[in-house]
Image (cartoon, rainbow, N blue to C red):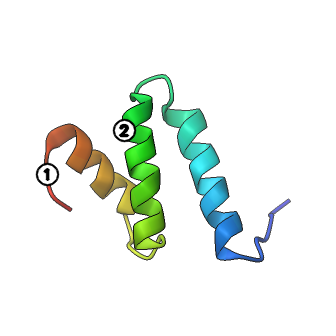
Amino acid sequence: MTKTYQTKEQVLEKAKMILRKSLRRVIPNEAIMAIETQIGVYGMRRKGLLGDLMEKYYFEISP
């Protein structure tokens, strides 16, 4: 069953939860918090945002 979110905030909270659960074991919490901050700044408007941010934090490549 597909869940439909009514607000941008619900989508961002779900994205943050998935990020925490899937990356917690391999990425330091400080980096996850920094990425979450950027998600809010960008408002999830960029395609590939998480990939760009991961590259920035782990390979020092600017998105």
Q: CA distance from mark 2 to mark 1?
A: 15 Å
Residue at image mark 1 = 61
Residue 36 in the image: state x and y as whole percent.
47, 52
Image quarter of residue 9: bottom right
* Label disc, if present, on residue 5 of the rendered structure: none
Question: 10 Å neighbourhood of mark 1: few (<14), some, or many (≥20)?
Answer: few
Residue at 60%, 35% (x, y): give it.
Answer: 21
Dot in front, 2 or 1: 2
Residue furthest out toward the right: 1
Q: Secondary structure at mark 2?
A: helix
Tag 1: residue type? Ile
Q: Nearer the viewer, residue 17 or 47?
A: 17
Question: 10 Å neighbourhood of mark 2: few (<14), some, or many (≥20)?
Answer: some
Residue 56 in the image: state x and y as whole percent.
22, 49
Q: Earlier in the sequence, mark 2 or mark 1?
A: 2
Examine the rendered structure and indicate whether residue 56 appears above or below residue 49: above
Residue 28 in the image: state x and y as whole percent.
39, 28
Examine the rendered structure and indicate whether residue 7 appears above or below residue 63: below
Horizontally, residue 11 falls left or right of residue 31, namely right
The C terminus is located in which quarter? bottom left
Residue at 40%, 50% (x, y): give it.
Answer: 35
Tag 2: residue type? Ala
Q: Secondary structure at mark 1?
A: loop
The N terminus is located in which quarter? bottom right
Residue at 48%, 65% (x, y): give it.
Answer: 40
Image mark count = 2
Horizontally, residue 61 falls left or right of residue 51, namely left
Residue at 60%, 45% (x, y): give it.
Answer: 18
Horizontally, residue 53 falls left or right of residue 12, namely left
Residue at image mark 2 = 31
